[in-house]
Image (spheres, grey):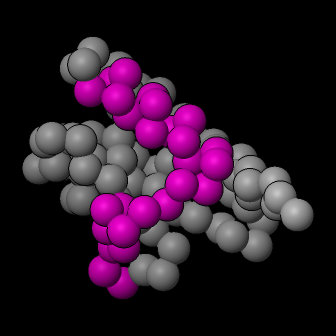
Amino acid sequence: MDQKPTQYTVTLKKSCAKDMERVPQNYRRTIQEFLNELELASFTAADKLLTGSDKSFSKRFGKWRVIYTVDSDCQRVEVCTVGARKNVYKRRR
């Protein structure tokens, strides 16, 4: 039997909309494609589990990072922050 892939709901915090406006266009397109893939639960080993958390991950796009949390029980992904590597982890604290 074929199993239907698990579909996750992806939500962005309000601040992420402003964050995305700051991202250069070429990265913005790639990040948007990544967010679409998250709906299909495509979490990979390339997504770094953040220290001190069992649900928060970071995905690298050049100098840009996407920080997100995964709630497997509710099948939900929340994108917390999108930003340049030098600032994104400071804002997370």
| Residue 92 appears in the picture as rendered | no
Q: On the rendered structure, is 20 left or right of 78?
A: left
| Residue 53 appears in the picture as rendered | yes
Q: Is residue 34 above or below residue 80?
A: above
Picture coordinates of residue 66 (x, y %)?
Answer: 35, 47
Picture coordinates of residue 68 (x, y %)?
Answer: 47, 56
Q: Residue sitting at 15 percent across and 41 percent down?
A: 62
Looking at the image, which is closer to me, 66 or 80?
66
Picture coordinates of residue 81 (x, y %)?
Answer: 39, 46
Q: Residue sitting at 26 percent across and 27 percent down?
A: 27
Q: Which region shows up in magenta?
A: 27-52
Quarter of the picture holding the C terminus: bottom left
Q: Residue sitting at 45 percent across and 29 percent down?
A: 32
Give yes or no for residue 79 being in the magenta stretch.
no
Locate residue 51: give its quadrant.
bottom left
Picture coordinates of residue 37 (x, y %)?
Answer: 54, 42
Looking at the image, which is closer to me, 13 or 54?
54
Q: On the rendered structure, is 80 left or right of 88?
A: right
Q: On the rendered structure, is 85 left or right of 56?
A: left
Q: Is residue 79 above or below residue 22?
A: below
Q: Residue sitting at 36 percent across and 68 percent down?
A: 45
